[in-house]
Amino acid sequence: MQRASREGFSGYWLPQATGLDALTTLAVAGSGVDMRLGVAVIPVYTRHPVAMAQQALTVNQALQENLTL
């Protein structure tokens, strides 16, 4: 993400197909990046709506309100 930001990209989208949690990955890797970040695919059926909203709000704060869910 740092490289994409330096090269002038306006956004970076990360899908969650398998493996790492996309929201948590964006919170960690997107810190200090000046671009819009978002999740392209996220399995909502495995999460309670309140827990999903809390995680999204937390990640959005960590990214200086640059998250698109």
Image: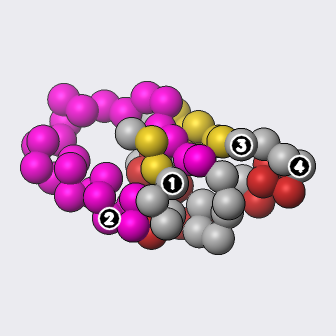
Residue wearing tag 4: 7
Q: What is the span of residues highlighted in magenta in the rendered image?
A: 36-61
The 10 Å Cα crowd at callout 2, few under 14, some 14 to 19, many 20 or more, is some
Q: Are marks 3 and 2 in contact (CB under 8 Å)?
A: no
Residue wearing tag 1: 66
Instruction: Tell me which residue sits at (19%, 29%) in the image.
Output: 45
Q: How is the image coloured?
A: secondary structure
Q: Which mark is residue 58?
A: 2
Instruction: Tell me which residue sits at (50%, 63%) in the image.
Output: 63
Q: Secondary structure at mark 4?
A: loop
Choose mark 2 or mark 1, whichever is in front: 1
Residue wearing tag 3: 10
Q: Return the disc, 2 or 1, that comes first in the chain's sequence.
A: 2
Kind of residue at disc 3:
Ser
Kind of residue at disc 2:
Thr
C-alpha distance separating marks 3 and 1: 11 Å
- Please say whether residue 40 is visible from this viewpoint: yes
Single out the residue that lies furthest toward the right.
7
- Residue 27: where, in percent of width, then height? 49, 62
The 10 Å Cα crowd at callout 3, few under 14, some 14 to 19, many 20 or more, is few
Q: Secondary structure at mark 3?
A: loop
Kind of residue at disc 4:
Glu
Q: Secondary structure at mark 2?
A: helix
C-alpha distance separating marks 1 and 4: 18 Å
